[in-house]
Image (cartoon, helix red, strand yellow):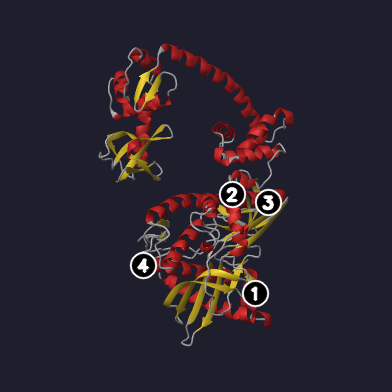
Amino acid sequence: MANNEKYTGMLVEYLDDGRLRAALATREQGDHVVVADASGNERHVSRELILVRHPDRRASRENLKESLGALNLERERLGGEVDLNLLWEIVRDDERGYTATALAEIFFGRSAPVEVAVMLEALLGDRLYFVRRHMEFVARDADQVERLRTQYEKIRLRSEGGQQTRRLLGGILDGGPLPRREEVAPLIAELTRYLENPFARNRETAALLEAVAGDLAPAEAAYEILERLNARPPGSRFALIGGLRTNFSEAAQHEALSSNPPPRPPAEPHWAVTIDDEETVEVDDALACEPLADGGLRVRVHIALVADFVPKGSPMDADAAARGTTVYLPETTVRMLPDPVSTAAASLTAGAARHVLTTDVRLSATGELLSYAIALEQIKVGARLTYEAADRILEGGAAPADEANFKVLDLLRHAAAKLRERRLAAGARLIHRREPKVTVVGDVIEIKVIDSSSASRELVAEFMVLSNHIAARIAADRNLPMIFRVQPNAADDAYAQRARLSLYPGFHAGVGLDCYLQASSPIRRYVDLVLQRQLVSMIGGGSPAYDRDELMAVLAAAETTEAEGRELERRAKRYWTLTYLQRGALEQPLEATVLRDGASAELTAYAIRGALRGAPNLSAKSRIMVRVARVDPLRGWLSLNYLQTVATAEEGVI
């Protein structure tokens, strides 16, 4: 099909994994066409993969679902008429190739787009009668067809054994009697290979697992079967399921042990603190604050200078790019960088000299941004604080040993409040959500609920936003290629548009700032490390470490790996929280909060949400008592039976 053909506004069918898929062409971009499916999801498709156009079937997003439905009904009707055996009998003596259009004309007597699409779909799925040569189809000779018929019959007979395997696996997952170990030894070996070799997972094994448990990811079904057979492989459940890279290359490990960062000048003496969870060992930020004579404040945000330890293109960089992010699972942490760098040399350990990228800011007494600069330097952190310790210091004032910490924290708290007020006035949306922190050691599950609205967590979050905003503003002012985060503010609904990544700066409605990026976690996010390298090259006066094309490649890979990592973390936390409830909370009355839809609630002690049954019409945030009605950790199901109301949102405590 010619590259200059116009598609926009019409239904098209494109080749995807060997099958035709119908969609609406929404716009054209060079060699690609952006298409939308019935759900409105968009994807970029090469023009060469668009095999059928329907000029007579125009559609819009408003009627797309109906238009595609009508097309599919017509295709199904015609598809039931296709008889490739008959078509083969008609053309088998011809040695030339036929296009799908020509074969549609022969079989249907017409070659409108829908007939061509149906014929093409049948031919693409055929393995018996025709051979595909580019986009033409040649009839096989009679001997070939007979040999293939015999071969496919043998495969069919073997598939009967596959049916037995499916029944066996289904019985295991359904809790039936377990077979003898010797009967399933080959199956155990196959499933173990499938889990332990994530980058070469067998498609036939995946298809088998999907047939047995279509509501589970194949890897999750494989692990569960092995666990029930008491044959699970060593390692973290969800690290195996997610196919995470748990070992670094030998070259990366050697490089981590022998890193030789460039010298950085020492910063002027000041008291800086880190605030993290107690178990955090990848410490990538520290804060300092001091009063100015005019009533303003000087704030310094120090970010671990990981770029000094991980050169672009190095073995460590290759491993970090492949991982994309550190993944925090209840059973283990799979780091983006080797421990000698991530938890030692680059981590901001109190009392040790560490390289940092510092954002140095002057604020007025009202929180106005007066001046800012970024610098590469060396500091010594004065104190390491946990969030809990920082909150206690802020709540109770300063014990003699905490006087220096209190001074810094109190100033930071006031500065954060002023910055937050300004962002809120600009339309920022602050979302406070309680999150479960789940830890699994052996067979012991511990759950702790984290409240993001605590004083220390809010001030740390505020200064990470400030640091990222300053980096974005400097990059935008100097036309430095960066990966920005933008979120246009819809006129009618500020929540309507999602944040997205862009190579160009723009307003971010969620944080209420004119430009924004994320570069505050270079130890654990690869995009942040890449952006830090850009800033380092700018400060040093050299050419950017990455051009826009290179950033596009980083962006494409990182978006996927970060999203997959977040989803794996979410699934793992939910699985282990539900397992905890299944073990010890089935008969207990539990407090919960009604959510906005009224059909679900969140358990107070576990910060996990489930479907709510039997409740009267209650407003959001009403406090109720519930009992677990159904829980399935494997599938993530949780339903709660309503018992009684503790307090409605309007009444307060009863």
Q: Which mark is residue 581?
A: 3
**Residue 608 visible:** no
Is 344 or 441 nearer to us in this picture? 344
Position of residue 480 relative to residue 244, above or below, is: below
Position of residue 502 relative to residue 182, above or below, is: below
- Identify the residue at image location x=60%, y=44%: 241
Mark whose residue sits in front, 1 or 4: 4
Mark whose residue sits in front, 1 or 3: 1
Q: Is residue 554 left or right of residue 451?
A: left
Q: CA distance from mark 2 to mark 3?
A: 39 Å
Q: Earlier in the sequence, mark 1 or mark 4?
A: 1
Residue 506 spot, x, y in % from top left = 37, 62
Q: Earlier in the sequence, mark 4 or mark 2?
A: 2
Residue 441 spot, x, y in % from top left = 71, 53
Q: CA distance from mark 1 to mark 2?
A: 43 Å
Mark 1 burial class by Cα count in 10 Å: few <14, some 14-19, many 20+: some
Give the residue at mark 4: 478
